[in-house]
Image (cartoon, coloured by chain):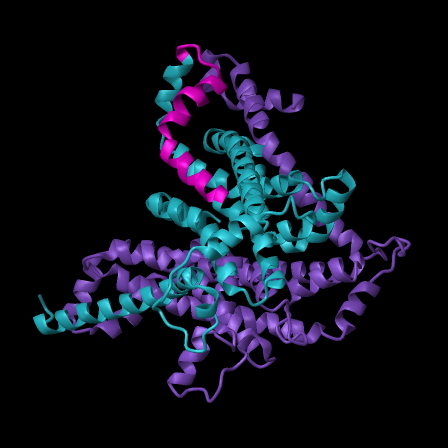
Chain colours: A cyan, B purple
Amino acid sequence: MVESKLSKRVQKLLTYIVLIAFSLFCLFPFLWMVITALKPADEVRSTTPSFFINNPTFENFQHVFWNTGFLTYFKNSLLVGVTATVLALLFSVFSAYALTRFMRFKGVKLVSVTMILSQMVPPVLLLVPLYIIMMQLGFLNSHISLIVAYTTFTIPLCTFMLTSFFSSIPIELEEAAEIDGCSKIGMICRVILPISIPGIVSTSLFAFVNAWNEFMFGYVFINDDSLRTLTPGLSLFKGLYTTDWGSIMSASVMSVLPVVILFLYLQKFLVEGMTAGAVKG
Amino acid sequence: MRASIGKDAQVQPFSRKEGPNRETKAKRIAYLFVLPSLLFFLVIVAYPLASVIWDSFHDKNLLNTGDGRFVGLANYVEVIRSEYFLQAALNTGIWTILSVAGEYVLGIIAALALAQGIRGRAIFRGIIIIPWVVPVVVAGLTWTWMLTPDYGVLNSWLVKLGLLDEPFYFLGEPDTALLSIIIVNIWRSFPFYTITFLAALQSIPRDIYEAAALDGLGPIGRFFKITLPQLKGVSIVLVMIHIIWTSINFDFIWVMTEGGPVHSSETLPIMIYRFAMQELNIGLASALASLLLAFMIIGFMMYYLYLNRKSDHRGGM
């Protein structure tokens, strides 16, 4: 239109250059992680690191898989993550429903405000009292401490995400179910949940990734190596296998892989959830 | 509950045909539904928050040598006078400001590039979000490996390009440790800005740009005169959230340097951890946590006042 064809083309070229630069910046650490993981020890410790692998090998992966605590950490993270996600979702479904339909009650409004406020409270400030509470309840060195903490800290965001999905459901649907004699809980299970499956998927994904990536509580609450979760386990690898970067990187590859696959598969959902959370949070 | 029943009945003459206790029943269900979430909040957030403030005024530690007596502001004084407090406070400021500024700039550039209607943008978008999905620990470890002086790929490149004479221990030198972690933090966090800006950019009406182009405004002029002002609201929210998230971040610094060398990359959250888990002094850790909390509340109030003033201003017009 107003701009010449030439300047349009220049702009397009510039855009591609910028995007390719960003992609390299974002991807390079992963690429390097994978390359290192596939290199035999003598190639990892080369003073002239190269992209090309002379003798690609899975020995780092095998070593990490069989000779370290990796598999245990992985299982623990999976257990804690899935349990926390299920619990957070269970409670969030109900509170989100209340926030969608019953905002006219003062108590419900108050809960929604406390949820926004609780999202602003940084977990690190609560580290000390939570440690003491867990100690007094005998939950230290047990997965319960992590499950409780992760559930609590993801409930607000899960609730807000679900609220934004629930509020798009027409109230007539609910009224029809009620006339048919459904109880509120029956109605939620049979009407609301089936309609909001995309919302449930993205919300649970969010809760799971949060739990999977969490570091501080896992690091502080769990001392027993057989109960340790993945992120603190990985960070301790650095101390244990100081120079064995091949092993550390292959453990890293195996711990990001589930998240990245989940993410690429459900990218659209997660992006929606992120922006919803950002706007509301 | 009982007192409010009468009030509800008065407020709703319109629902009389549905029965007066329908609303009471709805209220009971509503409260029942929010109760579990509320309980979690009370036990895991509200009570600990209160005890942080309570403990900050008491002599308390995990070894039971403290007698738990009230000591007034003694903990606060000790925290502020402690050897590394000023440096940690300064580090927290540097860490937060540089991180958020860098994330903002990268985030907006990437969002602008993605907002152009070009082929393959979905793939580029997917790639650019990846750093944000990765656990901080993995990001920290990978960058630590790339930055190592012996065998690290970045050092080897910098030497080859002639920018460095010999490999440099970025994370092991007091001058560069914090800066290196800041760069890694920017790398991981800027995608969040990109995604949010991208959504916001798409809601700016096209015709504003077309009108500006007709007026002879170039791409740079359009960016400063239209795009930036349009993104102001989103920007303020994003920056506020990230100032909080960044200033209280524990993971990155702990995984990469544990606050070292010689406390040169120690921020206040790392100091809380040290007080609590290494010196086992609950009083000191709580006092420091309360100080941080106070700063945050002051920040929020300033933000709130700013918003209020702005809406007053707008109302006046």
Magenta range is: A179-208
Instruction: Find residue A194 and report its image quarter.
Output: top left
Q: Is residue B70 left or right of residue B290?
A: right
**Above-or-below relation of B29 to A49:** above
Quadrant where the N terminus of chain A lies?
bottom left
Q: Is residue B254 left or right of residue A166?
A: right
Estimate the x, y position of residue A255 in percent, counting from the top left: 48, 51
Confirm whether the magenta stretch covers residue A206: yes
Estimate the x, y position of residue A188 in percent, counting from the top left: 45, 23
Q: Residue at x 66, y 48 (%)?
A: A225
User: How many labels, in total?
Assistant: 0
Estimate the x, y position of residue A133 in percent, counting from the top left: 74, 43
Q: Is residue B99 visible?
A: no
Q: Nearer the viewer, residue B127 or A100?
A: B127
Confirm whether the magenta stretch covers residue A12: no
- Most frequent secondary structure within the magenta stretch: helix
Q: Residue at x 52, y 20 (%)?
A: B23
**Above-or-below relation of A180 to A82:** above
Q: Residue at x 42, y 82 (%)?
A: B158
Estimate the x, y position of residue A117 in percent, counting from the top left: 58, 48
Q: Nearer the viewer, residue A224 or B56?
A: A224
Instruction: Find residue B294 and report its image quarter.
Output: bottom right
Q: Residue at x 48, y 74 (%)?
A: B151
Q: Is residue B82 visible?
A: yes
Instruction: Find residue A175 and report its image quarter.
Output: top left
